[in-house]
Image (spheres, helix red, strand yellow):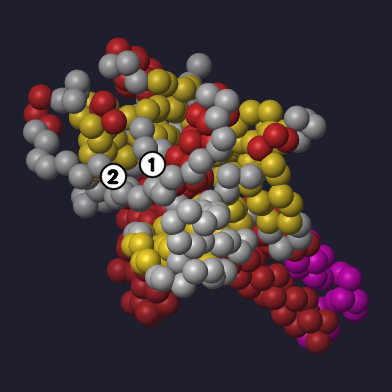
Amino acid sequence: MIYLRKGRCYIFDEPWCKLHERWFVKKNHNVVQLSQRKSYKTGRLGEENQIPTLQMTITSRLNILNSIIAPVLLIFWLGAIASFLIFLSFEDVNNGKVDSIFKTPIYGSLILFAVIIGTSIHYIKMSKSIQIDSKGIKVSNLFNKEFISWSEIKMIELIGKSQIANSPLDATILKLKNGRKIDLIASRYENMPTIRKTLQQVIECIDAKKPIELNPILETSKVDPIGFVNLSGMTKYSGNHILSFNGLVIYGLNAFTIFMVINSPNHFGLLFLVWIVIFGFTYGFLGSQLHYFHLDNNYLVVKNHVWPWVNDKYRVDNIKQVSIETPYKRSTSLMVITKDFKSNLYQGGSLRNSTWKDLLNNFQNLNVDIGNEAID
């Protein structure tokens, strides 16, 4: 009997055996399932042999921050506001300020609860579980499960855009022959590069009219590791972040709050806590929208005006595509996608339109595919 396990071959002398085997290989936290469900026979030389065919399955992993933590925090925040409105409404009734609960802000809480339900359903539908094998792709969420064979798919757009809340999101789009579209939002999955590489294998097999064979794919680091890059000879694409909207809010609001803290000693503790909250929001949320860029013939370097630790570096010859887009109610951004389908979005709130155009033109001169969804 021939027994295959974890890449090794063991030979036993039994004349006839039946084997049920299932393999699981785990490499760099990328779960790859190799399975064989059918029994098969094998024997001595000259006897009938039936060798199993291995089937590989790629399984998606949800991005914990974007798919779980962020929606939970948003729902918690909306729930807190709704609960506060309910509290104020009953306080007004109990204190005799109004004679009916329907004359209070309780309607606002009802609207917020409806928003919470809608938001929850939206995120559940968006956070699909994906399984890909040689037969097709299984897409499922809490409400629905479906298996789509490769013969049902008209086209696979590996790098596309999905419009969510008037914001273009990096996505892989499956266009079915029946006219349906299935959007796989890149930011929802920890191993989206692996999913895209696997789908690329499928496309190559279909184009070559060969049986679909999926090979294991190892994950690499998010940003291509590069040593020291001298910025002095590179072109800088930036603006005056202090006079940008984000900069004015960060510096202006924090300066005003500090002034109030200093000049209100009787309320120092409360105002200091208010300033901590304001600083955390402005430095965190608005600071994330203040990236700028250095570019030459060899490298792209991404920095941040207020986050000194940001220092992402890319080799130009490893960049597959860059695009300029405007996420919903956020600053104009640069999406960088490498040839192994790593992607990152950098918001550049200090750059003017003319600077964005110059940056795109220089990428085009370097033979990098460009996209423009934000600048006229």
Q: Is residue 165 visible?
A: no
Residue drawn at (73%, 56%) of the image: 145
> Mark 1: which secondary structure?
loop
Q: Is residue 179 left or right of residue 370?
A: right
Residue 324 at x, y = what percent? 44, 28
The correct choice, above or below, for 239 with respect to 23 in the image is: above
The image quadrant where one finds the N terminus is bottom left
Give the total number of marks visible in the rendering.
Answer: 2
Badge 1 crowding class, 10 Å Cα cut-off, few under 14, some 14 to 19, many 20 or more, is many
Residue 206 at x, y = what percent? 57, 29
Badge 2 crowding class, 10 Å Cα cut-off, few under 14, some 14 to 19, many 20 or more, is some
The correct choice, above or below, for 19 with respect to 231 in the image is: below
Residue drawn at (38%, 56%) of the image: 284
Residue 295 at x, y = what percent? 22, 26
Residue 36 is drawn in which quadrant? bottom right
Residue 342, numbered label = 1
Q: Which residue is mark 2?
A: 223
Q: Is residue 54 left or right of residue 110?
A: left
Residue 273 is drawn in which quadrant? bottom left
Task: Name the residue at the front extreme.
Answer: 46
Q: Amino acid at mark 2?
A: Val
> Mark 2: which secondary structure?
loop
The correct choice, above or below, for 192 with respect to 31 in the image is: above
